[in-house]
Image: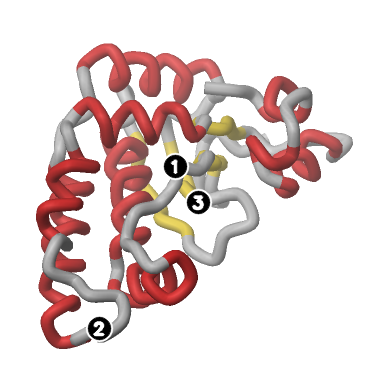
Amino acid sequence: MLTFAEAARRPVAEVGAETHRLAALEAPPRGLLIPAAFEEAYYRGVNLPETLGRLFVGVNPARIDEDALEPLCAQAQLLVRTSALMDDAVQLLYRALGNAGLSTGEVQARRPDGPWSEVAPRVTPPGTAALHAVKRLWARDWDLESVLERLDTSGGVGLEARPTLLLAGPGSAATP
């Protein structure tokens, strides 16, 4: 987990332009960046690449049947939301939330420069609600529109892990 100042020392391609903009603010918001490697470790730790690959094995990018694809996307989202992070990763996230002042109040999870966000309205220590918001955000990569876009652009359903921002929400005790 990275503070905005730490993330700003990394390339924009790795952490997102928004992260650099947040770090450059005179008073950056309370938050942290979850590196793409954390998401990738989650996927690999619970064998999601292979499981998701098997789930979508019958999808033909040249002839997409949206009616058949939609329930597969729902299953993929469920897998991402319900698979368990390894205990060490969970503890790392909880410590980072505490260090960033995000262990109480409202926390928003979103991708840098991304269109979606997930809100954990009442985070209490250790931070399980924030963890669930992160997993809901990651599951959005498997909604029908996102999968269709990947099929159109890359010819497959696979995706690269990306960083995730966690920011204190307006109703948060952690807001400066």
Residue visible at 33% across and 29% down in the picture: 127
2 or 1: tag closer to the N-terminus: 2
Q: Which mark is residue 110?
A: 3
For mark 1, give the secondary structure: loop
Q: Amino acid at mark 3?
A: Arg
Which of the pair 127/158 is nearer the observer?
A: 158
Residue 161 numbered tag:
1
Query: Looking at the image, is 147 positioned above or below residue 161?
Result: below
- Give residue 86's mark: none
Specify whether 52 is left or right of 7.
Answer: left
Circle 3 SS class: strand
Q: Quadrant of the C terminus?
A: top right
Give residue 64's mark. Answer: 2
Q: Is residue 111 above or below residue 129?
A: below
CA distance for labels 3 and 1? 13 Å
In which image quadrant can residue 130 be found?
A: top left
Q: Residue 77 at x, y = what percent?
A: 21, 58
